[in-house]
Image (cartoon, coloured by chain):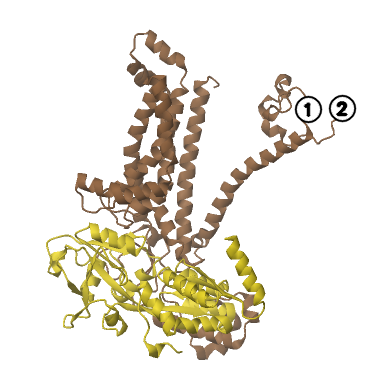
Chain colours: A yellow, B brown
């Protein structure tokens, strides 16, 4: 550790004043691994740029952005109008929004469940508690157990607005502390159903999803998410105070949206954004 | 005689108040420091310092309560509104309305308002309009959902087919009915007490009255060792192992539920109930037992019919303190209860507790917003309950000790 600090100190001394920069990133837990990986690889290429990454949730990221305690804010949802208003109050401008990755949410069921595909509306009815038994959607006579995320999670809000059309989750939905916990619970529960990142795999079966009754069932693969054929997807964002969007920070943001940065998105289990969205 | 050169003791009346008139006792100062000869100045300083430190603990309790209550207070005075739809003023009318009205509409402090330029205010006006466009088209959108009747009584929200008690704080229409989570807390606490109290009391009676001294030396520390298990480890154990085993035994439907969490919580409160009850039973004077035995009672009869009744207030205190510990415990219930805010009395249903709700939701709640305030409100409620139960327990315990030692 000491050695590392020494090297860091020497590097700083060597490039003093030139390009030495610290970038702080706070925000979404969903994006935490991705953001850490970006920071690690970028630091490897630009030793004089130190990037500090923290999680906490998209809301925490926006709070830090408006308090100006962070340079970049990771968010797994777009900013709410109240958050934008708070930023304007703090630094007089709207924060700049960059789309940096695509994420598909999978719906998981137990591996023994014969159901292979559902429509978005059916998934919605299951999670709002209108459908309570698997036989209602053509499966075995088995009660459905719902596994959801804590309401502080970005996935929770996204799933609620996209799949449940803003209705409340059924009160009987058990809330788990993370996607891995949901997969573990679904893997142990024959009647279980849960949702989470498409990148998470083993343990439970990913359902193919139909946009409506007449559309084909689509698997949550990279190709299907990137061309938006799979219906449950979202963008992941980075927000920045426009006054800070220059020098080191601007080149970091450009690098994230370059091929090199988007390759890391794929490695971590999310999906790269299409080329036409990379320059804005 | 050396002159007394350090200051007199200003707080002495607090410390030895009852024995002011008795010259025999007066020479025995606080902590015995003045016994025999006057305290060294450094000792005197150390004494004051320790006194201050012990005061700090009391002060902290009041500060924490004051802080929690202060954060919740705007709710009680009705200053916060959670209505999803707020009235909107078109951007074009910006210059027509009075400055003060504009300031309140944009939620700015007078200082912010004075220093902010016109364009920035216009940007803010635009976000207000955008916010109104995002707002849900819903008959409940104008309701301020943090009024008491929505917090405590059922209401038929749009999209629901009957009036419900419901906790849905992240929603288009935020629903903050606290009854389901209060019930969840009480349900899990009850299960844990029903499980832990008989076990802990039996162990306490055995250790204090019946066990041979050698066995006692093993059992007592072993049970107290239970309290050393970090609650996150106990919760983890409950989540992975106990939930599966108990489901196999009882065959209920939901794997994580109030029952699993209650049993795991029981392990956390056994040492609390055990050590206080054991303390109370041991403090019953030995001649009670001896008198009973001399009159021909068996050891069991002496324990059950003489010692236990004498120590009953202490046993009560043990249960009350166990209750305080159980209802305030967070990590175990967060991990093992399934955290679904169901309004149900069935212990095999999943349950959401007050503590788990605060732990899981506070991180994302907007600072100073209605959700944030509600979480502090239930926190204050929890604090009051544990404070009162702990105080009741301690008071009963002190009285019992006084009575048994013949002081009163």
Query: For numbered disc 2, what is the local secondary structure?
Result: loop
Pick the front one: B155 or B206: B206
State the quadrant of the N terminus of chain A: bottom right
Among the two numbered marks 2 and 1 on one chain, the one whose residue lies closer to the N terminus = 2
**Residue, x 48% and y 37% (percent of image)?**
B392
Residue B324, percent across and down? 43, 42
**Residue, x 65% and y 42% (percent of image)?**
B53
- Callouts 2 and 1 in the same chain: yes
Residue B29, percent across and down? 71, 27
Residue A222, percent across and down? 29, 79
**Residue, x 50% and y 33% (percent of image)?**
B395
- Residue beneath disc 1: B38
Residue A11, percent across and down? 62, 73
Q: CA distance from mark 2 to mark 1?
A: 10 Å
- Residue beneath disc 2: B2
Q: B39 above or below B210?
A: below
Disc 1: CA contacts within 10 A as few (<14), some (14-19) or many (>=20)? few
Whether pointer 2 and pointer 1 mark residues with C-beta atoms closer than 8 Å, the reply is yes
* Residue B209 disc label: none
């Amino acid at each position: 550790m000491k050695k590392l600090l020494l090297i860091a100190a020497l590097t700083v001394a060597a490039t003093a004043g030139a390009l030495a920069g610290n970038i702080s990133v706070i925000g979404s837990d969903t994006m935490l691994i991705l953001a850490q990986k970006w920071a690690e690889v970028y630091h490897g290429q630009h030793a004089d740029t130190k990037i500090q990454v923290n999680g906490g949730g998209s809301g925490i990221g926006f709070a830090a952005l408006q308090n100006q305690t962070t340079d970049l804010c990771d968010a797994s949802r777009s900013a709410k109008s109240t958050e934008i208003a708070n930023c304007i109050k703090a630094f007089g401008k709207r924060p700049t929004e960059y789309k940096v990755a695509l994420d598909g949410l999978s719906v998981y069921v137990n591996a023994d469940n014969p159901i292979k595909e559902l429509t978005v509306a059916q998934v919605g009815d299951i999670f709002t508690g209108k459908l309570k038994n698997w036989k209602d959607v053509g499966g075995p006579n088995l009660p459905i157990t719902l596994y959801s995320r804590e309401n502080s999670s970005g996935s929770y809000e996204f799933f609620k607005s996209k799949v449940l059309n803003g209705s409340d989750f059924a009160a009987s939905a058990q809330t788990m502390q993370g996607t891995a916990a949901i997969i573990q619970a679904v893997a142990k529960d024959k009647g279980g159903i849960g949702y989470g990142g498409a990148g998470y795999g083993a343990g439970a079966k990913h359902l193919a999803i139909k946009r409506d009754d007449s559309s084909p069932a689509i698997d949550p693969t990279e190709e299907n998410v990137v061309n938006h054929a799979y219906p449950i997807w979202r963008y992941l964002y980075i927000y920045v105070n426009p006054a800070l969007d220059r020098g080191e920070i601007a080149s970091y943001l450009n690098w994230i949206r370059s091929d090199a940065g988007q390759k890391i998105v794929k490695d971590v289990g999310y999906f790269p954004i299409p080329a036409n969205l990379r320059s804005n | 005689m050396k002159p007394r050169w350090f200051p007199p003791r200003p707080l002495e009346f607090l410390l030895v108040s009852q024995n002011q008139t008795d010259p025999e006792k007066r020479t025995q100062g606080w902590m015995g420091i003045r016994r025999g000869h006057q305290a060294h100045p450094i000792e005197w300083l150390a004494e004051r310092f320790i006194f201050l430190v012990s005061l700090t603990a009391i002060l902290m309790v009041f500060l924490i309560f004051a802080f929690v209550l202060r954060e919740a207070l705007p709710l009680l005075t009705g200053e916060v509104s959670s209505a999803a739809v707020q009235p909107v003023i078109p951007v074009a009318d910006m210059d027509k309305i009075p400055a003060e009205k504009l300031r309140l509409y944009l939620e700015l402090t007078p200082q912010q308002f004075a220093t902010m330029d016109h364009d920035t205010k216009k940007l803010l006006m635009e976000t207000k309009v955008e916010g109104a466009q995002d707002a849900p088209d819903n008959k409940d959108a104008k309701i301020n959902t943090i009024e008491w009747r929505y917090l405590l009584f059922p209401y038929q929200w749009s999209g629901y087919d009957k009036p419900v008690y419901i906790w849905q704080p992240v929603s288009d229409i935020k629903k903050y009915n606290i009854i389901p989570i209060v019930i969840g807390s009480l349900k899990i606490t009850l299960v844990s007490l029903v499980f832990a109290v008989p076990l802990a009391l039996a162990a306490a009676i055995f250790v204090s009255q019946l066990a041979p001294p050698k066995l006692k030396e093993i059992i007592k520390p072993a049970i107290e060792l239970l309290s050393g298990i970090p609650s996150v480890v106990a919760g983890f154990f409950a989540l992975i192992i106990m939930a599966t085993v108990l489901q196999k035994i009882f065959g209920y439907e939901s794997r994580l539920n109030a029952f699993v969490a209650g049993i795991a919580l029981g392990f956390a409160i056994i040492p609390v109930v055990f050590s206080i009850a054991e303390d109370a039973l041991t403090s019953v004077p030995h001649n009670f037992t001896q008198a009973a035995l001399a009159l021909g009672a068996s050891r069991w009869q002496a324990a059950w019919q003489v010692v236990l009744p004498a120590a009953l207030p202490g046993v009560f205190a043990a249960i009350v303190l166990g209750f305080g510990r159980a209802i305030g415990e967070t990590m175990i219930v967060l991990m093992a209860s399934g955290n679904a805010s169901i309004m149900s009395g069935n212990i095999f249903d999943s349950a959401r507790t007050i503590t788990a709700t605060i732990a899981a939701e506070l991180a994302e709640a907007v600072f100073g917003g209605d959700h944030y305030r509600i979480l502090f409100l239930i926190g204050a409620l929890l604090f009051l309950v544990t404070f009162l139960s702990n105080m009741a327990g301690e008071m009963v315990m002190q009285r019992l000790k006084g009575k048994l030692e013949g002081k009163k």
